[in-house]
């Protein structure tokens, strides 16, 4: 029985991919040049010729427009950079953890400062912070006090994070989310740089060259030799 050779299937363009070059089959397009300059509405064959003369691709960037908007660019480079950005975004999103810090409406100063320092630590590490106020009994009738407390908290950590969701009531709780100003990758890079700097820092004072106070001791050696 004859063995059939394996059939190689050609990869068809994905629906999410932009149409490029000869795949753009509309009669005319609105053309954008490689430097972002607006060239205007031209026939598609003219746009293709200009792209070929520049040794670049003609890429459809707004197919829903009438006529569709196309741009002359290096499509391979464009796809690579877009993929790298998407990969970095997914990695940062996957590594970001939502940390929770709970407050009471009548929290004392020491407890508030302790929880705020902890929140700053989370933000410095590139994690989000969910600040939550737990209302008790009649405190539920004073939501404005909770809003003031969370606004104060947001101002105290403004150097390390910004408000992503404003205070909202969730049952007996009020919550607000603070996002870090630096993502997980940037926070990790800074931490590694700080560790490396600490390892290569200046040596302790007692390991340096003798001070002026120690110099006279060295001048006493000739006297000892005479004896």
Image (cartoon, grey):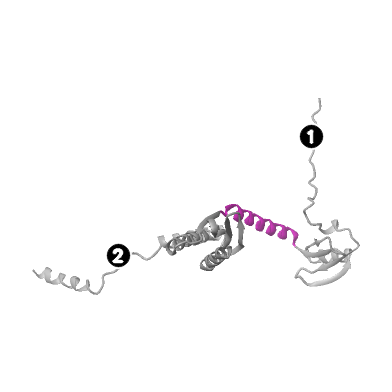
Task: Give the magenta part as a residue range.
Answer: 74-97
User: Which residue is denoted by mark 1 in the rendering?
Assistant: 5
Q: How many marks?
A: 2
Residue 83 sits inside the magenta stretch? yes
Q: Nearer the viewer, residue 194 or 59?
A: 194
Q: Position of residue 65 (x, y in %)?
A: 84, 63
Local SS, label 1? loop
- 100 sits to left or right of 40: left
Q: Position of residue 42 (x, y in %)?
A: 88, 68
Residue 121 sits inside the magenta stretch? no
Residue sitting at the far front: 138
Q: Position of residue 200 (x, y in %)?
A: 41, 62
Residue sitting at the far left: 227
Q: Nearer the viewer, residue 183 or 17?
A: 183
- 148 sits to left or right of 53: left
Q: Residue at x 50, y 58 (%)?
A: 103
What is the quadrant of residue 170 in the picture?
A: bottom right
């Amino acid at each position: 029985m004859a063995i059939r050779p394996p059939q190689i299937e050609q990869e068809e363009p994905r629906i999410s991919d932009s149409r490029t070059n000869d795949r753009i089959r509309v009669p005319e397009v609105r053309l954008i040049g490689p430097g972002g300059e607006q060239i205007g509405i031209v026939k598609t064959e003219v746009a293709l010729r200009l792209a070929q003369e520049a040794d670049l691709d003609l890429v459809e960037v707004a197919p829903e427009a009438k006529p569709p908007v196309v741009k002359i660019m290096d499509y391979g480079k464009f796809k690579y950079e877009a993929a790298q950005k998407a990969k970095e975004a997914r990695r940062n999103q996957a590594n970001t953890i939502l940390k929770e810090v709970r407050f009471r409406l009548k929290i004392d100063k020491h407890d508030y400062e302790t929880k705020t320092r902890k929140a700053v630590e989370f933000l410095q590490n590139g994690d989000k912070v969910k600040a939550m106020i737990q209302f008790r009994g009649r405190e539920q009738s004073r939501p404005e006090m909770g809003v003031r407390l969370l606004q104060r908290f947001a101002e105290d950590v403004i150097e390390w994070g910004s408000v992503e969701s404003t205070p909202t009531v969730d049952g007996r709780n009020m919550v607000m989310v603070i996002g870090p100003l630096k993502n997980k990758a940037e926070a990790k890079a800074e931490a590694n740089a700080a560790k490396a700097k600490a390892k290569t820092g200046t040596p302790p004072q007692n390991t340096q060259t003798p001070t002026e106070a120690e110099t006279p001791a060295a001048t006493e050696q000739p006297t000892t030799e005479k004896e």
